[in-house]
């Protein structure tokens, strides 16, 4: 992807690889809080190919989780997706809206952000699905695990019968029926066949004794088992894109290995694309084909695994890799990135490269907003939001090391 | 740096050299430490006649830390590493065991002795968000130790009051850990996680300790901040000649900062030794599994097939008999009377374990089978049952007597008699690993595993078999396999050798290991 | 700002202000409470009359704006024979007694103002006593757990088994058995110093106000002993969770004594729910005191509860005798509860950095 032109042009889906299933352009999410506007996600571009695992790596405050939530419209007030396009490839969907919303359709791609909200929500399950970090709080503790997965299955079944409407999934299931079902023993929202499918899914994700476990409650499961159950629930709708937000962060390393194996296997079997969000570069290396590195709400570098690990251009990427102790070859001294993560408050962010105040190679060029450049000329994959893609670092243009201290003093910061 | 440190310190501190060991008396010696939490132990329960059950958080730990070195304690959640750290500082009362700090038994200390100990041994906690009292300023937090111990004992000569002196010292400490002295009156919530952790370190340093327990000090921090803090800790160790007990679950961090490492599993130390030895030639199967599971941050990692350790950690309420790791160990030792591929043996043991822990009923298997044939008529055919079991537990390919035994047991199981099936299997397949608890043996680099304790069990296991037993497919990474072979093994030429012995497990090992 | 071990940070004050501005109910509550406090504090200065002064000629006057009809019987000579005549006489209100008078001719408004004193003093002192007792017990139980916890909390449970009113009456009975005075007469400094006198002269209000004021000490003690349980429970819950916080372990690791840990670390962090409970308790104790006075157990007659008891017989005719103190109680309780809500909403930690002390 070449330099992003500053003017917003929605002339259809952005260019990309023929295998792309998802193309995100200029996505921005803001939080409007009492303390001010927080720019959580800032003009993010990336693509996800069919059957690949795309990683988004960043530290806390980088905006990676909010990006994931923005993709499937789960951002809660006071946050809002303020701009951007999320082009999703689905030929049937495209046909359906081609006449109604011509600007939202381009070939087989549909810009989900321009679709009506109900349709967007209907995409959750069959198109997009999400696995969260803490399985214990993602599952209802008062309903058995089997029942919850069966619900997801049931929702998908009804949706398939009536694809574009969210009403059909729960239509006809009102208060009266709820009370009746509570009183009469054998009725319920879920049917026996959806429960059976739930047990099947539990088995597929490697939970032993699935029939028995299905009747247990979340607190009776271990962390690893719960996460498997979450994955089972996420796969109930057979989605095209699975978004995994730090799926193994809360797990022990041996359990993490199991879960990552599972994700790999399922992804290969069902040809699902996965967006893997994590702060752990090791997990990225194991699972992902292509990676985006996020900092302060922006993707500062993206490319293949080799691009990012072996030939990083952005000093933040370099710094990140340099701060990790190597399991196999320990360095006597780590090279941390000095300073702290910046505030994302709109008023405090200068119109400049957000990393400049911590960058060992900051130059005067960096005091302006930096667009995305190709890391190597003509490179399709490897893009960097850094002037170093265009020119060499030179002392002559370097910013003095206290440049930002002064600016902060002037603003009366602590 | 400190003017007030009482004279006790002079002959206790090491010279700050790293890897101290061998010959020098350890600063901290832990022997047989146990910490059990008893449940069902209130008056009511006694009245109702309930037996007190115990959670064996720490179940017999031996450790040594030499002056000036950093000993790492690694393990996953539930292994008892944090409890060990807190118990050896006497923040919890041990159920059993001794902890000698500079020759004195910490568990027996009281009153003044204990107070003096508290000045010499400090702790830094994991969670920067809960380790600082949110109602105190950072300056108060750092100088609280000074107030408690009435440091300085007398008003300083230069006219400052004691309080001023303490305040100055707090400022000094804040600067030393990389914060600015003028933040002394700020509250914790005004700092980032990394900065708070620095405050916690400053607090631990205030009394000039010799020994610091670091309980997962960087686990809750971002990677870039983690690096800053690790560097800081290393610098401080050198400047002040500190000795560290570094508790962590992140192996890369441990590799980076520790001189020696102890690996814990379910309340016990399973392996201990110099860092490089442990990471490059691990002995204990659990250590191997841990190293195997850690994802490396490099391009070579892509698509690596990891042989993940199956199953979950057993509950510390009811740890497996003998070696706690036997329920998941890919190298679990077969009894002398059995000689089947390791993969199948592991499968039988898994089946046994599930049956014995009652997490498994024949009924649930039937239900699963029924659900697979959703909608069709399903008859409960034992043949189908057994086939499903064989598939799930990797039991195909057995022959001879072992096959008969297994088939019998499966038949019994299909009829719903789980206990009987378990008994049948136990009679035939009981492993030495479950009968005897292994002890740490091996000198500098010691492992608690029967594979190393008794020549009898030193079977040269085929790496591919072991790999399969862990549930993975394909050959494991060659660099770790080579080191799985037991060094200095005189008698092994294949599995048949070991089986030829007379089954006596108590012969002393004359190789002096 | 520090009050002993408790420090009120600027953030707390900011949160309180913010909540005050945004919540109309908070403002109402504060106004009500301020009114009551002022009434109680300045009673001798602002009460129109001496609340104890009886004037039987002016008994049962209605409040301003109302008229009352009374049946009066008198004997008369009609045509030479003695007859009893019953006629309806309208009784008009008097500006001198804006809220009317009771059956003894005492001014209702003055009695209401003085009643505020009784209620507030009992409420405050009773709450403080209950809080000190309860928090100490609760923190100890929560911090040490085990047998100590069991023993202390079983005592609390036993105490809770009795309805508070019944328990209070029983305790008062016990006290009276051993001690003659259920209440203590305290001199009123505003009167003895002459401040009240000069103020009233200047303003033109009738003087001599009572020089002593009856403080129902036994009620205070009893109320403390009945209500400590609520504080104990909250304090125990807080202590149980706070003791697991790492900063508590850190203090122990530094060698702090248990007392220091509890008072320096656990208590300040537990204070918010305790404070909120305290405000609610003041209201509850005021109600308890009113009930006790109503039944005549409190040892003072200058109390809202007592006045309600007095007016009970006249509810259909001179309804104001019972109603005015009743409304006073209602307004006080509402006001205090609203203030409690305000405190709770402002001090609720919630999200990091927002709210909280």
Image (cartoon, coloured by chain):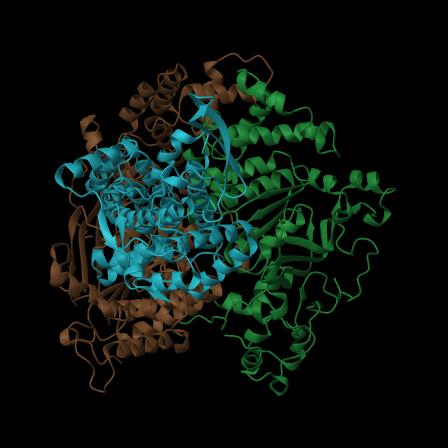
Question: B222 and B313: which one is in front?
Answer: B222
| Residue A120 located left or right of residue A306 | right
Q: How many marks?
A: 0
The structure residue drawn at horizontal position 22% and vertical position 28%, both measured from the top left corner, is: B50
User: Is residue B440 visible to us here?
Assistant: no
Per the rendering, the colour in which chain C appears is cyan
Question: B399 and B149: which one is in front?
Answer: B149
The structure residue drawn at horizontal position 33% and vertical position 32%, both measured from the top left corner, is: B339
State the image quarter where residue A34 is shown.
Answer: bottom right
Q: Is residue A93 above or below residue B440?
A: above
| Residue C294 located left or right of residue A366 | left
- Please provide percent x and percent y for residue B470: 42, 40
Q: Is residue B505 above or below residue C248?
A: above
The structure residue drawn at horizontal position 61% and vertical position 38%, both measured from the top left corner, is: A269
| Residue B353 located left or right of residue A396 | left
| Residue C207 located left or right of residue B491 | right
Per the rendering, the colour in which chain B appears is brown
Q: Is residue C171 above or below residue B26?
A: above
- Please provide percent x and percent y for residue B420: 31, 18
User: Is residue B243 visible to us here?
Assistant: yes
Q: Which chain is the one coloured green?
A: A
């Amino acid at each position: 992807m070449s330099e992003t032109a500053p003017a917003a042009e929605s002339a259809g889906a952005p260019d990309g690889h023929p295998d792309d299933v998802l193309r995100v352009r200029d996505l921005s999410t803001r939080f409007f809080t009492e303390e001010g506007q927080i720019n959580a996600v800032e003009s993010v571009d990336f693509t996800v190919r069919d059957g690949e695992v795309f990683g988004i790596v960043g530290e806390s405050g980088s905006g990676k989780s909010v990006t994931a939530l923005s993709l499937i419209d789960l951002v809660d007030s006071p946050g809002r997706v303020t701009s951007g396009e999320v082009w999703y490839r689905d030929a049937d969907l495209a046909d359906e809206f081609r006449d109604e919303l011509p600007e939202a359709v381009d070939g087989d791609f549909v810009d989900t952000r321009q679709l009506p909200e109900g349709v967007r929500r209907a995409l959750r399950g069959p198109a997009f699905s999400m696995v969260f970090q803490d399985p214990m709080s993602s599952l209802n503790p008062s309903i058995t695990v089997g029942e919850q997965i069966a619900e997801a299955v049931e929702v998908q079944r009804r949706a398939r019968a009536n694809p574009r409407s969210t009403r059909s999934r729960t239509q006809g299931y009102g208060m009266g029926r709820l009370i009746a079902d509570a009183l009469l023993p054998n009725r319920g929202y879920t049917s026996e066949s959806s429960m059976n499918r739930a047990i099947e899914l539990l088995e597929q994700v490697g939970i032993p004794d699935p029939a028995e476990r299905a009747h247990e409650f979340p607190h009776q499961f271990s962390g690893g088992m719960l996460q498997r159950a979450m994955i089972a629930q996420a796969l109930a709708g057979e989605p095209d894109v699975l978004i995994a937000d730090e799926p193994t962060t809360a797990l022990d390393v041996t359990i993490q290995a199991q879960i990552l194996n599972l994700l790999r296997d399922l992804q290969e079997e069902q040809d699902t694309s996965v967006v893997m969000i994590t702060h752990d570069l090791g997990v990225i290396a194991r699972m992902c084909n292509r990676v985006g590195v996020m900092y302060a709400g922006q993707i500062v570098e993206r490319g293949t695994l080799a691009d990012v690990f072996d030939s990083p251009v952005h000093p933040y990427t370099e710094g990140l890799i340099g701060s990790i102790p190597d399991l196999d070859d320990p360095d006597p001294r780590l090279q941390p990135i000095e300073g702290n993560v910046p505030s994302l408050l709109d008023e405090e962010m200068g119109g400049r490269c957000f990393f400049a105040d911590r960058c060992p190679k900051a130059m005067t060029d960096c005091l302006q907003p930096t667009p995305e450049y190709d890391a190597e000329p003509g490179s399709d994959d490897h893009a960097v939001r850094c002037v170093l893609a265009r020119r060499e670092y030179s002392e002559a243009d370097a910013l003095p090391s206290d440049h930002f201290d002064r600016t902060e003093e002037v603003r009366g910061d602590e | 740096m400190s003017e007030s440190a009482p004279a006790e310190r002079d002959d206790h501190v090491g010279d700050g050299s790293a890897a101290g060991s061998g010959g020098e008396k350890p600063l901290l010696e832990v022997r047989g430490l146990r910490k059990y939490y008893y449940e069902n132990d209130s008056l009511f329960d006694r009245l109702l006649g309930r037996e007190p059950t115990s959670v064996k958080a720490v179940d017999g730990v031996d450790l040594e830390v030499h002056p000036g070195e950093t000993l790492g304690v690694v393990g996953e959640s539930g292994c008892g590493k944090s409890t060990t750290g807190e118990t050896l500082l006497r923040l919890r009362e041990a159920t059993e065991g001794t902890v000698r700090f500079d020759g004195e038994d910490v568990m027996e200390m009281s009153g003044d002795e204990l107070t003096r100990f508290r000045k010499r041994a400090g702790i830094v906690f994991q969670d920067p968000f809960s380790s600082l009292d949110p109602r105190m300023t950072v300056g108060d937090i750092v100088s609280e130790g000074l107030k408690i111990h009435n440091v300085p004992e007398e008003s300083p000569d230069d006219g400052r009051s004691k309080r001023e002196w303490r305040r100055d010292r707090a400022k000094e400490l804040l600067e030393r850990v990389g914060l600015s002295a003028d933040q002394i009156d700020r509250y914790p919530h005004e700092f980032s996680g990394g900065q708070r952790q620095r405050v916690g370190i400053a607090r631990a340093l205030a009394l000039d300790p010799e020994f610091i327990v670091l309980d997962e000090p960087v686990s809750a921090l971002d990677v870039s901040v983690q690096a800053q803090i690790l560097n800081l800790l290393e610098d401080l160790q050198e400047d002040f000649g500190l000795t560290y007990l570094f508790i962590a679950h992140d192996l890369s961090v441990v590799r980076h900062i520790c001189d020696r490492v102890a690996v814990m599993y379910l309340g016990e130390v399973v392996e201990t030794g110099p860092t490089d030895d442990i990471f490059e030639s691990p002995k204990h199967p659990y250590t191997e599994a841990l190293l195997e599971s850690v994802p490396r941050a490099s391009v070579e990692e892509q698509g690596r097939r990891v042989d993940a350790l199956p199953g979950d950690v057993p509950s510390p309420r009811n740890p497996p008999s003998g070696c706690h790791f036997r329920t998941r160990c890919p190298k679990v030792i077969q009894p002398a009377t059995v000689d089947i591929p390791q993969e199948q043996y592991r499968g039988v043991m898994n089946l046994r374990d599930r049956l014995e822990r009652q997490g498994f009923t024949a009924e649930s298997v039937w239900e699963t089978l029924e659900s697979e044939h959703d909608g069709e008529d399903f008859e409960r055919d034992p043949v189908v049952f057994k086939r499903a079991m064989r598939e799930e537990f990797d039991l195909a390919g057995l022959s001879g007597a072992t096959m008969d035994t297994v088939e019998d047991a499966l038949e019994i199981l299909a009829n719903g008699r789980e206990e009987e099936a378990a008994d049948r299997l136990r009679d035939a397949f009981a492993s030495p690993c479950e009968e005897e608890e292994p002890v740490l043996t091996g000198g500098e680099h010691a492992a608690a595993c029967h594979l190393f304790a008794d020549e009898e069990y030193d079977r040269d296991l085929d790496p591919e078999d072991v790999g399969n037993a862990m549930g993975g497919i394909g050959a494991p990474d060659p660099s770790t396999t080579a080191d799985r072979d037991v060094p200095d093994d005189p008698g092994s030429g294949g599995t048949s050798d070991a089986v030829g012995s007379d089954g006596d497990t108590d012969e002393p090992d004359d190789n002096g290991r | 700002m520090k009050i002993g071990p408790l420090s009120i940070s600027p953030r707390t004050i900011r949160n309180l202000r913010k909540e005050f501005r945004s919540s109309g109910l908070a403002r109402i509550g504060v106004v009500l409470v301020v009114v009551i406090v002022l009434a109680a504090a300045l009673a001798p200065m602002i009460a129109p009359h001496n609340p104890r002064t009886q004037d039987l000629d002016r008994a049962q006057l209605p409040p301003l704006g109302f008229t009352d009809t009374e049946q009066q019987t008198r004997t008369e000579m009609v045509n030479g024979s003695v007859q009893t005549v019953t006629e309806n006489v309208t009784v008009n209100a008097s500006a001198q007694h804006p809220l009317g008078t009771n059956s003894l001719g005492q001014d209702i408004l003055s009695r209401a103002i003085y009643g505020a004193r009784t209620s507030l003093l009992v409420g405050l002192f009773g709450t403080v006593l209950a809080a000190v007792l309860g928090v100490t017990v609760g923190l100890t139980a929560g911090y040490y757990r085990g047998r100590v916890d069991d023993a202390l909390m079983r005592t609390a449970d036993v105490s809770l088994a009795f309805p508070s009113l019944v328990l209070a009456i029983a305790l008062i009975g016990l006290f009276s058995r051993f001690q003659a005075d259920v209440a203590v007469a305290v001199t009123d400094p505003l009167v003895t110093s002459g401040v009240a006198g000069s103020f009233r002269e200047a303003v033109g209000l009738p003087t001599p106000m009572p020089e002593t004021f009856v403080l129902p000490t036994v009620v205070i003690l009893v109320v403390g002993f009945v209500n400590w349980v609520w504080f104990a429970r909250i304090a125990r819950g807080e202590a149980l969770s706070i003791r697991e916080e790492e900063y508590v372990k850190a203090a122990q690791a530094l060698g702090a004594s248990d007392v220091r840990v509890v008072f320096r670390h656990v208590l300040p962090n537990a204070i918010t729910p305790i404070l909120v409970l305290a405000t609610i308790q003041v209201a509850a104790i005021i109600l308890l005191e009113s009930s006790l006075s109503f039944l005549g157990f409190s040892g003072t007659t200058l109390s809202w509860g007592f006045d309600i008891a007095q007016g009970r017989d006249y509810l259909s005719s001179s309804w104001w005798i019972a109603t005015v103190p009743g409304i006073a109680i209602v307004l006080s309780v509402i006001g205090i509860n609203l203030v409690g809500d305000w405190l709770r909403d402002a001090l609720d930690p919630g999200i990091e950095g927002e709210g909280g002390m």
